Image (cartoon, grey):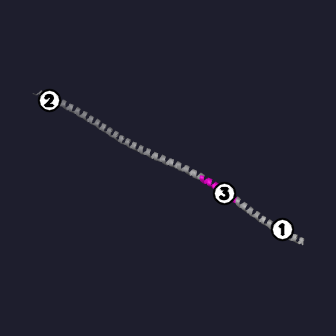
Amino acid sequence: SGREKPNLFKSCLKEKEKMDKLLLLISNKNKEIDAFISKQNELNLMFVSAAESESIATALGEAQKEHNGFLSELTATDAAIDVTNDTFLGHQKRIEELKVMISKSQENFIDNDKLNKNYEDLISTLSYRLHQLQVAHTAHKR
């Protein structure tokens, strides 16, 4: 019975060593699981950030479309302004041409006025001469 005790002790020690090894193994496995969970959390964060990035990219795409829309509206507005400006410049040129024509008409009118005055003077002179001739003719008949 004295021999059994050391054997029991030895077998207990062996069991304890097995248990210690198992505990170490479990501890290592727990560390691996923790590392895995940590990695999984990182991946989840990356996935969330990827999803956020995707929604940001979508929003950016929408903003870009809107910006392009504004740009094309601006381009169209610029073109319309150019056309309006050209039309305005055309009108201005036409107004200047009309001013010149009016000015020439006024000069012609003044010239015509002078001509009319000259004609009136000439007619008046001719009428006076005709009258003188008639008077002389009448006097001559007597």
Q: Residues within 10 Å of mark 3 (few under 14, many from 20)?
A: few
Kind of residue at badge 1 = Leu
Q: Secondary structure at mark 1?
A: helix
Task: Compute the Cα span from label 3 to label 2.
Answer: 130 Å
Task: Compute the Cα span from label 1 to label 3.
Answer: 46 Å
Image spot of residue 119 (x, y percent): 78, 64
Q: Secondary structure at mark 2?
A: helix
Residue at point 51%, 47% (across, down): 72
Q: To which quarter of the image does residue 7 belong?
A: top left
Kind of residue at badge 2 = Leu
Image spot of residue 63 (x, y percent): 45, 47
- Residue 86 as seen in the image, left or right of residue 24: right
Residue 6 vertical position relative to residue 114 in the rendered view, above or below? above
Image spot of residue 108 (x, y percent): 73, 60
Q: Say which label, 1 or 2, has the lower sequence index.
A: 2
Task: Compute the Cα span from label 1 to label 2.
Answer: 176 Å
Kind of residue at badge 3 = Leu
**Observer-nearest residue: 128 or 63?**
128
Is residue 133 magenta-colored? no
Q: Say which label, 3 or 2, has the lower sequence index.
A: 2
Looking at this view, name the residue that lies furthest to the top: 3
Is residue 89 magenta-colored? yes
What quarter of the picture does the C terminus occupy?
A: bottom right
**Observer-nearest residue: 100 or 139?**
139
What quarter of the picture does the N terminus occupy?
A: top left
Residue corresponding to mark 2: 8
Q: Which mark is residue 130?
A: 1
Residue at point 55%, 50% (across, down): 80
Residue 139 vertical position relative to residue 82 in the rendered view, above or below? below
- Residue range in magenta is 87-103
Q: Residues within 10 Å of mark 1 (few under 14, many from 20)?
A: few
Q: Which mark is residue 98?
A: 3
